[in-house]
């Protein structure tokens, strides 16, 4: 289990969450 994979998934999750928040505004 690679730490890079964890970091990548967190970045993707965060970017998708901020994208939906910006879309809601």
Image (spheres, helix red, strand yellow):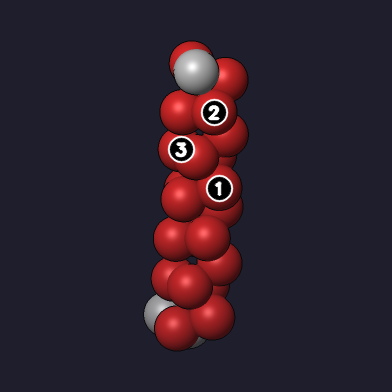
Residue at image point 46% right, 38% down: 17
Closest to the observer, 24 or 14: 24
Which type of secondary structure does the marked residue at label 1 adopt? helix
Mark 2 surroundings: few (<14), some (14-19) or many (≥20) residues within 10 A: few
Dot 1 or dot 2, earlier in sequence: 1
Mark 3 surroundings: few (<14), some (14-19) or many (≥20) residues within 10 A: few
The x and y percentages for residue 5 are 52, 72
Residue at image point 46% right, 50% down: 14
Q: Are marks 2 and 3 in contact (CB under 8 Å)?
A: no
> Comparing marks 1 and 2, which lies closer to the viewer?
2
Closest to the observer, 1 or 12: 12
- Residue receiving disc 1: 15
Measure the alpha-carbon separation of dots 1 and 3: 5 Å
The x and y percentages for residue 11 are 52, 60
**Is residue 23 found left or right of 1 in the rendered image?**
right
Measure the alpha-carbon separation of dots 2 and 3: 9 Å
Please tell me whether residue 13 is drawn above or below residue 19 in the rendered image. below
Mark 1 surroundings: few (<14), some (14-19) or many (≥20) residues within 10 A: few
Which type of secondary structure does the marked residue at label 3 adopt? helix
Please tell me whether residue 8 is drawn above or below residue 13 in the rendered image. below
- Residue receiving disc 3: 17
What label sits on residue 22 in the rendered view? 2
What label sits on residue 24 in the rendered view? none
Residue at image point 55% right, 67% down: 8
Q: Quadrant of the rendered structure where residue 4 is?
A: bottom right
Give the farthest residue toward the front.
25
Q: Are marks 1 and 3 in contact (CB under 8 Å)?
A: yes
Which type of secondary structure does the marked residue at label 2 adopt? helix
Closest to the observer, 20 or 9: 20
The x and y percentages for residue 10 are 44, 60
């Amino acid at each position: 289990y690679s730490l890079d994979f964890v970091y990548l998934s967190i970045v993707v999750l965060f970017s998708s969450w901020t994208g939906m928040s910006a879309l809601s505004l």
